[in-house]
Image (tube, coloured by chain):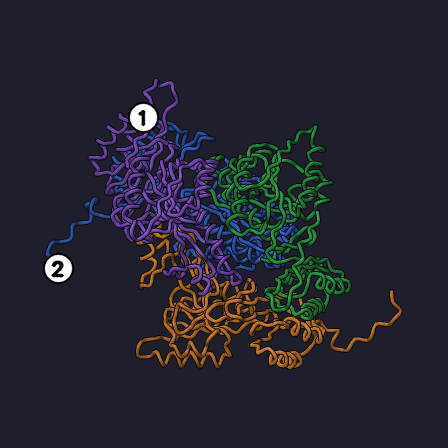
Chain colours: A orange, B purple, C green, D blue
Amino acid sequence: MTTQPTPPPAAPATAPPTEWVLTLSCPDRPGIVHAVSGMLAQHDGNITESQQFGDPSSGLFFMRVQVQSHASREELESALAAVAGRFEMSWRLDVVGRPVRTLVMVSRAAHCLVDLLYRERDQGLPIDVVGVVGNHPDLADIADFYGKPFHHVPVTAATKTEAEDRLRALVTELDVELVVLARYMQILSDELCRDLAGQVINIHHSFLPSFKGARPYAQAHDRGVKLIGATSHYVTGDLDEGPIIEQDVERVDHSRAVRDLVALGEDVERRTLARAVRWHAEHRVLLNGHRTVVFH
Amino acid sequence: MTTQPTPPPAAPATAPPTEWVLTLSCPDRPGIVHAVSGMLAQHDGNITESQQFGDPSSGLFFMRVQVQSHASREELESALAAVAGRFEMSWRLDVVGRPVRTLVMVSRAAHCLVDLLYRERDQGLPIDVVGVVGNHPDLADIADFYGKPFHHVPVTAATKTEAEDRLRALVTELDVELVVLARYMQILSDELCRDLAGQVINIHHSFLPSFKGARPYAQAHDRGVKLIGATSHYVTGDLDEGPIIEQDVERVDHSRAVRDLVALGEDVERRTLARAVRWHAEHRVLLNGHRTVVFH
Amino acid sequence: MTTQPTPPPAAPATAPPTEWVLTLSCPDRPGIVHAVSGMLAQHDGNITESQQFGDPSSGLFFMRVQVQSHASREELESALAAVAGRFEMSWRLDVVGRPVRTLVMVSRAAHCLVDLLYRERDQGLPIDVVGVVGNHPDLADIADFYGKPFHHVPVTAATKTEAEDRLRALVTELDVELVVLARYMQILSDELCRDLAGQVINIHHSFLPSFKGARPYAQAHDRGVKLIGATSHYVTGDLDEGPIIEQDVERVDHSRAVRDLVALGEDVERRTLARAVRWHAEHRVLLNGHRTVVFH
Amino acid sequence: MTTQPTPPPAAPATAPPTEWVLTLSCPDRPGIVHAVSGMLAQHDGNITESQQFGDPSSGLFFMRVQVQSHASREELESALAAVAGRFEMSWRLDVVGRPVRTLVMVSRAAHCLVDLLYRERDQGLPIDVVGVVGNHPDLADIADFYGKPFHHVPVTAATKTEAEDRLRALVTELDVELVVLARYMQILSDELCRDLAGQVINIHHSFLPSFKGARPYAQAHDRGVKLIGATSHYVTGDLDEGPIIEQDVERVDHSRAVRDLVALGEDVERRTLARAVRWHAEHRVLLNGHRTVVFH
């Protein structure tokens, strides 16, 4: 409809744009969205998905944006740094769908490992499991089947420090971004938890009421609960008390023996963990003190 | 607090049979089902629904039978007594669908009361609410609308004994079979709990993890839970620890304020309580120590 | 059927700001978020909640923003009109929490009406039910209890046009913004559906597989389904085929008689309808062709 | 610790009893339970779990009993035959926990196969997968990992009869009791369906409303559904219309692309199929015309 010739595109603009995911948090105040969207507009960014949340109780603001742009990472990071400085932002920029380098830690129970590896291979879960660590050798065959290196790192009271050193070395050597405790039955040291804060996801059973002992399913059976559940959370020093990412439950009745509760518990554990890992890997989980904001 | 439903009139065999519901429990051993079904067959009984459960952990056997028969209550009770003696049974015989005489106790929150009265009137919940007791007068209008007598029984530290006496008197005068604590915010005395054992149903919120304080929804919000729940249970001396009848949950996310959690909590509380009351009134709940068997 | 909420009084900046909710949709292209957030920033707006969604399949962009500002409605509307012109936007501005003037239409079944009125009174559902219309008089007492005018508008083949005229008159006189068909068993004319497009919400049973006949619960029973459900949707000419707002299901088993399915169906219907009405009244539902975007 | 010699094993009564599962159906009339329980009592049977259901609409009675007894299979079957004759019963006797010989049929989608083989190996699902048949070779590696023979049986219009002959041969040679169509994308012939009636379980997607076309998830996305589901059923000639064993749903929202619906659909399909297979293998599913009775 216009006689104006289309300006010749700059050479790189003919390539499809990259889709970026930007997550950020900062003290809440007017102008944040405008500043961020302005910066993205200056880089020819087309926002395809965006969510914000201002938490009245913590006074913090959270944002997740997916944006298509031809700008380079350096250009975007430089522009972001300027905005971030003005608003005291924590932020992170990544490419949508990039697999997160993940180390899975297991003991003897297979259900969570099988499910994660299946979902990576067949369901587009955006993780790249670069290794499986077991304090027992039992699950090596599953790792093998999916072509994943298995590291047997036994843990005893005497070797605990040595085992954690091995783990730290693996995290460094393999450039690990995420550690998943997939029914790993050992407690990490407080120091390791602090060093990997926000990068370790755990799954544990949960019940109404809750049971703290060594045989929780037996306790739940004894108490006659009608629901059993699971909670997936970031690990802090206080093992089962870190920020919650996802919870789910399964219904049971009086006819279930303890072994039935365990089997049903495995189902709810694996699906709860898989959701938490997916949302983390898609940069949908932001920390808000000891709570999470989950933009799913 | 006993309830003898009016015996059905002796009738010629051409009248439709009465449908009875028999519940029983006893130490598990061979021959129970055969003895009970034989006794029923001798009275021309046609079993329309039956469930049994033998609990390996308690060694007890539980049974619920619905049976059509022209036999009179006296004939059936006499025959049952003979079988019960052989097997050390506890048992109960009632007519299917007979409304259970129920006293509902409330404070200020309306959600459970509204729901129970609606279900009695419109949904065939087999209870007959013979009175509503409030320690505050706020809900009198709801009771009035449904044509139910409202008794304002204030409770203070000074009047607690007097209030319980009033409650006991109502239970006796009104021939009450079931007391429902529909968000009644007072704790019953241990003695009253014992006297009404198995006849008082309570509803309380429940969370993963659980919170014991005065403002549980604020605690749950502060902890960032992803599920809120409710538990309906029989009352024992230990208020929230009686045998569980039903539990349910509702999903929440980070954007929910405390008032949202309270509103969602009310929804899950009222439906959990309604199910527990229905199953009790249909004689589907049997006590198994501090657990329940629910034949639904 | 237009509704102009009373504009908040002009106030000095020291008064608390008004919290506005802005919803909009337009063809998706770069710069929308930046333009909207810039306009809001110019009016000292503090965004407290915001969600966006770009739909690749329809090419449309949707946005919902809650923003605190001292600007007047006139100022905001004028600024919005300028932005809207640039982007071909449909938009709507309202005050957060303002009750939506609602007309509820019923026949004989009480469950949805009881639930909506209870939630308006006790649960903060932001609607103001300005009238209840019944084609039967049965539910007048419930309307009375909640202090709502009840209009008996019988419908027969002969009086259908007249009845719709009455309905249109009520919508105008009462300044109705939303019509809820709360198990109203009459079909509205295509013309009325068009005139009230996007302002009428219906609830209907739904099953897997679906049944179209007159006695759907009997058909579902006959087919032996294990789930029964409900769908709440905007009404278009094609009665049960309008844009879906919410769906939910309830589990059933072989032992359920048709009357049990009906009772459980009522539970799932009322909670599904209540959610749809809440999300509509909070301006969380945007139309996307014959689909919806629900920002909950 | 004792000097008493071990009693000779010949004494049958000192060996632990076998736990049997008996399922039966017949026209409903008085005396069935008494006759069955009497027969079991005569063989020193201790009933550990029992459920009955009389269906008023079909006039049929259904029963499932687990019973411990030292009687031999021949003794029990002979006694059962006598009772069955009196009541025109269909019945089946099996040992509790005996793995059911199962053939799994697949195409290219892995999710159901992976889940079934995992549950057989690690979760006590009482099936013995004696072979996997694929009309494509893609899933041979998964069968290999679990040590299961994989049979590649391609199907084209020209070879369909031949392929079914091969399938029949496998069923005979491998003594197959159950065929699971684990996302097998071929339609079995009516004749084969009839020959294997009650022995073939299928899983298919199901939606509210339901979609019949070739790309159901695309249709569901286009329609804007809020729930996606799955139905597991016995196969009859009419492919997706056989007796339903189990159904389940998963919640979705407007932001989900078709590929997300497919991934979530896989989750609900695999867990729905796994439950149906477990209940069938535990003899908990009885046919009631074109419906099922499921004693879970």
Q: Residue furthest right?
A: A3
Q: Which residue corresponds to mark 1? A: B7
Quadrant, the N terminus of chain A? bottom right
Residue beneath the point at 69% across and 66% down: C36
- How packed mark 1 is, by other alpha carbons closer than 10 Å (few <14, some 14-19, many 20 or more), is few
x then y, percent, for residue D42: 25, 35
* Residue C32 visible, this orientation: yes
Q: In the rendered structure, which amino acid carries the disc numbered 2?
A: Met
x then y, percent, for residue C114: 52, 41
Please tell me whether residue C266 is drawn above or below residue D253 in the rendered image: above
Q: In the rendered structure, which amino acid carries the disc numbered 1?
A: Pro
Q: Nearer the viewer, residue A89 or D63?
A: A89
Q: Give the left or right position of residue B40, taking residue B118 as reference.
A: left
Q: Nearer the viewer, residue D164 or C126?
A: C126
Kindly report the distance in space between the C-alpha atoms of the residues bearing marks 1 and 2.
62 Å
Say if labels 1 and 2 share a chain: no
User: Disc 2: which chain?
Assistant: D
Q: Which residue corresponds to mark 2? A: D1
* Residue D145 visible, this orientation: no
